Amino acid sequence: MNYFRWIAGCGPAGAWRVVAWARAALLRLLAVAAMLAFSVHALDTDRIVKSAQKYGPTGVANAKALQQMMLALGGKDDTARLKAVNDFYNQRLAYVEDIDNWGQVDYWASPLESLGKAAGDCEDYAIGKYFTLTSLGVPHSKLRMVYVRASIAGAPNGFVAHMVLAYYATPDAEPLVLDNLQPVIRPAAERPDLAPVFSFNAEGLWQGVGSIRANGDPLTRLSKWREVLMRARQDGFQ
Amino acid sequence: MSLIRQVWLLLSVTLVLAFAGAIGVSVHSARHYLQTQLDLKNNDTAQSLALTLGQLKGEPAALDVARELAISSQFDTGYYERIRLVGSNGKTLVEKQADPHPLNAPGWFVALLGLAPADGVAQVSDGWHQIGRLEVRSQSAFADDELWASTLHTVGLLAALLAIAGLFSTVGVNRIRVPLLRTVDQAKAITERRFVTVDEPDMPELRNVTRAMNAMVGRVKAMFDEQAGQVELLRRQAHCDPLTGLSNRAHFLGRMKVMLDAEDGAAGGALVMVRLVELQSLNRTLGRSATDRLLQDAAAAMIESSRRFGSSEVGRLNGSDFALALPDVDSLRESAVDVGARLRSLMRVHEGGAHVVVGAVRWVHGAPVSSLLAAADQALARAESRGPWTVESDDAAGESTALGEDAWRQRIQAALAARNAQLVDFPLVSRTGELVHHESPLRLRLGEEGALVSAAQWLPMARRAQLTADVDLLAIELALQATEGDAKPRSVNVSPSSLSDSAFSTRVHALVVAHPDAARKLSLELAEAGAVKQLHLVRELAEQLHGSGTKIGLEHAGERLGETRGLLEAGLDFVKLDASLLQGLAADEARMQHVAGTVRMLHGIGLRVYAEGVTDVADATALWSVGVDGLTGPVLQASRSA
C-alpha cells in the first residue's frame, strides 16, 4: 500500500498519519465557509432523476429510488430523515476503493456519481448523505463532515483514516454519527472506535457555488470539497 | 476630413484603445491574482489554525490559555488584521485585532480598485464537541500598495510604448503623406492650368494616378506643341516677309502704331529707315539666290543691331526698304550709324555695286504713324541724294529726356510717396456686352501742378530707376481700393522688371490678403515680351497668389506664344492678344487664320483669350466669330455712341 493510497483513501493508518492525512486533505480543501445563513430550498427531485441519466441505467434506477425515498420523507422529522438516508446509502453503495472505482487514488464523487456506480468509499457515503439531507431541508449548520481515526480489528496498526457524517441537533449537543462501517446511527459517545480529528461543512460556501462556472474559479478547481459541492448542485441537490 | 487626418484619427483611436485595454487587462489580472492569493491565505491559515486548536488537549482552564496562545502566536507574525474565535453560541471567545497598515496607494485608487478579500473561516471542534468558528483576516494594505505600484509600472511602460508607437506612426504617415501631397499638388496644378509632370512615387496606388496624370500632361503638351507649330506658321504667313522673316509692311505699321499709342509704351524712340540701293543691278550680277542670301544676311544684321534696345521691331516695307522701330533711344545718330556700319561691313563681303543709305528720325509717344513715315522717307531721300553709305538723322524733335535721370527718379518717387496717382478705367467686355474687367493703367501727377500723365511718359524712367515695383504696388493697391468701392473687377499692369524684385510677390500677396474680397476681382497682366523671358518668376507669382482668386495673364501677346512651352506651367488665367495682330483682321484671311489658330491653342490649355485695341467693328465681329472671350479698344466707344 503506497503512501498516497492511505493518504487519499480510507485505508488503515497510524494516529499521526491520520492527522497528517487530515492536514494534507485540508491543504487541498483550502476553504470552508463561515457559519452564516442557511436557506430552505424547494425540493426538486425530478431534476435529480433527470441528471442521473448521464450516469447510466443503474444511476437512473438508484436516483428514482432516491426520489421515492425523499418524497416519502416529506413532513417527517429529522430522526426519520437521518435513518432513511443513512440506510439508503449504506444499502445502495458497495464499498469500493477510489482507485478501483474511479481510477484515481482519491476521488470525491457526487451523490449521483456514486449511485451511478452503486459503489463508493467512506467520503462518498458521507457526501451522499450530506447532500440528500440538505436537500430534504436539514440546515447545513446541523451537519458536519468529520475526519475520524477509526480503530478496526485486523487493520494494520489497528487504525484506518475514515470519514463520517455528524448530526448536531443543537450546537452544543452530542452528535449522531452516520457511518458506513456501523450502519446503525449512534450518538458519538457510543462510538469509542472513532476519534474525530477535524470537521467541516458547506456553510457559506453553498450559497456561492451555483454562480460559479465549472472551470471558472481556480479555487473551486483546487478544492475537492468545493468541486464536489458544485457537481452536486449541478445535479440538482440543494 | 482629409485622408491624412482620417489616418491619424484611426491610428490615435486604435493606439489609445490598445493602451487603455492593455492597462485594463493588466490591472484586472493583477488585482484578481492578488485577491485570489489573499483569499487562499485567509482560508489556509483558518484551516491550519482550526486544526491546531482542535488538537489541543488539557484541563478546560489550561485549554483556554493554550488556544489564546496558539491564536496569538499566529497573529503576532504581524500579517493579520484580525483573528477571531466565535463560540457556537455566537459569543466571541478570543479576538486579536490590529490597525490596518497605512496605505501608500491614493484613496481614490483603493476606493476604485482596492482589494476586498473574504475572511478565511473554519470550524473548530474538540473531539465531537463544537467549539466554534475561526475567522481570519489578513492585512491587505500591502496588496493594495502592490497593485498601485504595478499599475504605475504598467502605465509607465505602456506610455513609453505608446510614445514609440506614436513615433513610428508619424514616420509611417509621413511616408504616405509626402507622395500623396505631391500627387495632390500635381492635380491642383493641372486644375490651375499648370501642366507639370512629377516623379512617380513608390506607392503603387499613387504611382498609377501620377502616371495617368503625367501621361495626360504629356498629351496636352504634345497637342500644344503641334498647335503652337501651326500658329507660328500662320503667324509667319500673316505677318512676315517670306524671304527674310522680318515683319511685313502691314504688320510693321501695326506694331509701330501700337508702340506709339500704347498707354505703357515707350515715351520716344527712333525710326530708322534703310534702303538697299541698286538692288536690281545686284540681282543681275550675282543672280537671284545670292541676292536673296544677301537680303537675309542684311535682315539678320538689322535684327542684331535692334536687339540693343528693348522691344524693337524690324520690318521690310518693300523690296529694298527696311525699317527699324527702336524704343528708348538715347542717341538717334548713334543708332542709325550702327545699322549703317553693320550693313556696310556685310556688303563688303558680297561683291557687287549695291550700297546702303540710312535715314533716321526721332519719334515721341502719341505721334501719328503716317507723318513719322513721311519724315523718315524724307531723311532717307536726303541720304540717298548725298551718295552711298550716307547716314542722315533728323534730330529735330530734340531730347525728350531733357530732365536728368535723378530728377526723374525724384519726381516719380515724390508722386508715389504722395500717392499722386490715379487709375484710368478702360472696359473689357465679353461677347454679350458684360464687363469682364476694367483695364486700369496708372497715371501719375509729376510735379505739384502737373497733369496726370500716362505710363508712356514716365515708365521708361521708372524702369531705369528700378521703381517699377513701387509703381505696380501702388497701382494694385489703388485698384483694390477702387474695386472695394464699386465692386467692378479691375486689371492692373505689372512690369516684368518688377518680378525680379525679390520682395515684390510677397508684398503683392500682403496687399491681396488685406483685401480678400476685392482680390477675387483683381487681375494682373504682364507684357508678353518681358514675361516669357522669366516665366519661372511669373509662375512663382501665380503660386504666391494661388488661393486669393487673383488672376494673372499676359498682355500684348501673340508674337511669341508659340515659342514657349513654359506657358503650360506658368498657371496663367488669360492672354490678351496684341492690337498689332488684330488690325484689319476682317479683311486679311492670313491674319484671321493666325488669330483663330492662336485662340484655339490657348483655349485648348484652358486660358481665356481677350483682344486688345480693337478699332474696327468688322474686326470685332471677326474676333467674336473665332471665339475670343472679350475685347477692348476704341470700337467699344464707337459701338456705344453708335
Image (tube, rainbow, N blue to C red):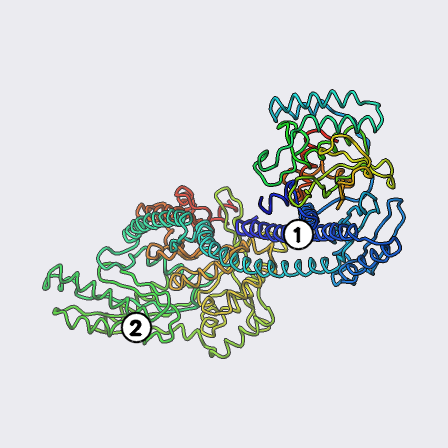
Q: Is residue A216 visible?
A: no
Say left or right for A136 vs B272. Answer: right
Task: State the residue position of label 2.
Answer: B336
The tag earlier along the polypeptide, 2 or 1, is: 1
Q: Quadrant of residue B464?
A: bottom left
- State which chain disc 2 sits on: B
Indicate the secondary structure of the residue bearing disc 1: helix
Q: Is residue B525 above or below residue A47?
A: below
At a point 55% along the width and 74% down the height, the residue shown is B413
Nearest the eye: B116 or A65: A65
Indicate the secondary structure of the residue bearing disc 2: helix
Nearest the eye: A198 or B228: A198
Residue B386: x and y, percent? 23, 74
Residue B239 is marked as none
At a point 79% along the width and 27% down the height, the residue shown is A83
Residue B155: x and y, percent? 64, 58
Say left or right for B429 vs B536. Answer: right
Task: State the residue position of label 1.
Answer: B33
Q: Which residue type carries mark 2?
A: Ala
Residue B465: x and y, percent? 47, 75
- State which chain disc 1 sits on: B
Say left or right for B58 vs B41. Answer: right
How crowded pointer 1 is (Cα within 10 Å; few <14, some 14-19, many 20+) is rated as few
